[in-house]
Image (cartoon, rainbow, N blue to C red):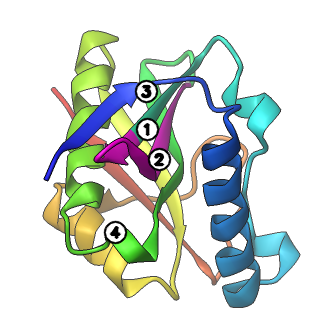
Amino acid sequence: MSVTIALEPARQEAIIALLDQSDRYMQALYPPESNHLVDVSTLEQPNVRFHVARHDGAVVGCAALVLSGDGTGEMKRMFVDPAARGLKIGRRLLDALAETARAENLAAIRLETGIHQPEAIGLYRSGGYTEIPPFGSYQPDPLSLFMEKRLR
């Protein structure tokens, strides 16, 4: 079994298909006003570090680190193909994001996730993320949970 995680362009057919799968999943869980998804063009911006997980060469997961310009980064579009779950792809992506954030000299990584995703919340907590108030342009939302991992 070969799993790799590398920085890659987001605009690839297999990644767009994975993001579409993520969109459908999120739309089934949350109303539009509680979905804070970003599109592929946003993931192509210079302040984004887009990580792609591959298993035997096939795209199985992704996560973006958006450099916020204030010494923090925000995790966006973290998703693992359900067919690849159990391979620790989510943990590997979290580790890769933290490594990239340290290389960018960031003090923390922040994220917004939905309350109906207990597996994701458990992964984030086990990875050292703790709950914080809404940050950036986010407003309080009873369907959202905001978390942060301090890096220094």
- Residue 24 in the image: state x and y as whole percent: 73, 76
Q: CA distance from mark 2 to mark 3?
A: 19 Å
| Magenta span contains residue 64 | yes
Q: Which one is earlier in the sequence, the residue at label 1 or at label 2?
A: 1
- Residue 52 in the image: state x and y as whole percent: 43, 38
Q: Which residue is mark 3?
A: 72
User: What's the amino acid at mark 2?
Assistant: Cys
Q: CA distance from mark 4 to mark 3?
A: 30 Å
User: What's the amino acid at mark 1?
Assistant: Val
Q: Which residue is mark 2?
A: 62
Q: Which one is earlier in the sequence, the residue at label 2 or at label 4?
A: 2
Q: Which one is earlier in the sequence, the residue at label 4 or at label 1?
A: 1
Q: Say if 88 sits above or below 38 in the image.
A: below
User: What's the amino acid at mark 3?
Assistant: Thr
- Residue 41 in the image: state x and y as whole percent: 81, 30
Looking at the rendering, the stretch of residues picked out in magenta corresponds to: 53-67
Q: Which residue is mark 4?
A: 84
* Image point (47%, 47%), residue name: 62
Q: CA distance from mark 4 to mark 1?
A: 13 Å
Mark 2 and 3 residues: CB-CB less than 8 Å, in contact?
no
Q: CA distance from mark 1 to mark 2?
A: 5 Å
Q: Quadrant of residue 136?
A: top right
* Image point (13%, 53%), residue name: 1
Q: Say if 26 sits above or below 29 in the image.
A: above
